[in-house]
Image (cartoon, helix red, strand yellow):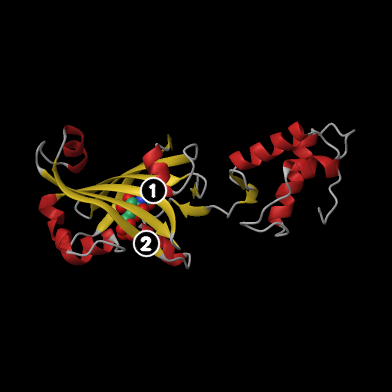
Amino acid sequence: MLQNKVRIDKKSPIPIYYQLKNFIKKQIENGIWKPGELIPSERELSEELEISRMTVRQALIELVNEGLLFRKRGMGTFVAKPKLDQNLTKLTNFTSDMLSRGMKPGAKVLVVNTIQATKKLAEKLNLLEGDNVVELFRLRLADEEPMALERSFLPYAKAFPILEEELENRSLYELLRSKCNLNLVRAKQTIEISYCDPRNAALLEVTADTPLLLIERVTFTEDGEPVEYVRSYYRGDRYKFSIELSV
Ligand code: 16G
């Protein structure tokens, strides 16, 4: 079953579950176990390696939590696809980000609406409470796989021309540039952990315990005017963000 026999050293001060974890990581890193593949079951691993099922379970749970493996109920444990790494040093948009990875971007429109600005929206978008705001709620897909949910709010007075356009599978930033003459050049963004509610889990096709990354962004034009306030929920099991730091 295990092509490369695992050397579990029961006398080593390194905990057995940790040795097993490292072995599984190596199998994935070296491409012996490939994304989407079923790995040996808890029982098989415990019998073959002569270690307790509890120990195997601990290693697998940690690897699931780290996003290297995922479980399908009643089917077993599988190797996860590598996470998409988004660099946070440049202002990008979903469409160009996916295209630069050679993936097919997608946008499924769930809600498009004109609403009145709440106090919070008015503050974010530099409007008065009650001013009209365009609300756009979309499911974002990469190669047809759901990746994120994005709820964008835009000042109606600036963004209304997009309401005349087909929004399905279109880039919002491209439409803002070409139809509204709005060139987005700067954004302020925060990232925090969030959890799935059952509705979001169904839309993202994940289990309700999948962690999400909530990213809030206000995006500005050259003249410093905010034109987008967006709350994005990115799948924590498929995404990581990297930042380059310098002194
Ligand atoms: C990105 C942005 C989101 C923006 C969207 C526009 C992050 C975390 N979020 O997903 O704020 O609304 O791009 O993408 O990067 P689009 O031009 O493809 O519609």
Q: Residues within 10 Å of mark 1 (few under 14, many from 20)?
A: some
Q: Element type at marker 1?
A: helix
**Picture disc at residue 106:** 2
Q: Mark 1 is on which residue type?
A: Leu
Q: Specify whether 6 is left or right of 145.
A: right
Q: Specify whether 139 is left or right of 72.
A: left
Image quadrant in which you'd find residue 99: bottom left
Q: Mark 1 and mark 2 in contact (Cβ < 8 Å)?
A: no
Q: Residue at the spot x=88%, y=35% of the render? A: 10
Image quadrant in which you'd find residue 188: top left
Where is residue 125 shown, x and y percent of the image?
A: 19, 43
Q: Mark 2 or 1 closer to N-term?
A: 2
Q: Which residue is mark 1?
A: 203
Where is residue 144 shown, x and y percent of the image?
A: 43, 61
Question: Where is 79 relative to 169, above or below?
Answer: above
Q: Residues within 10 Å of mark 2 (few under 14, many from 20)?
A: many
Q: Nearer the viewer, residue 187 or 200?
A: 200
Q: Mark 2 is on which residue type?
A: Gly
Q: Residue at the spot x=83%, y=41% of the render? A: 47
Count of numbered tags:
2
Residue at far right of view: 11
Where is residue 24 shown, x and y percent of the image?
A: 73, 48
Q: Element type at marker 2?
A: strand
Image quadrant of ligand 1 equals bottom left
Image quadrant containing the N terminus = bottom right
Q: Residue at the spot x=22%, y=39% of the render? A: 124
Question: Where is 30 relative to 187, above or below?
Answer: below
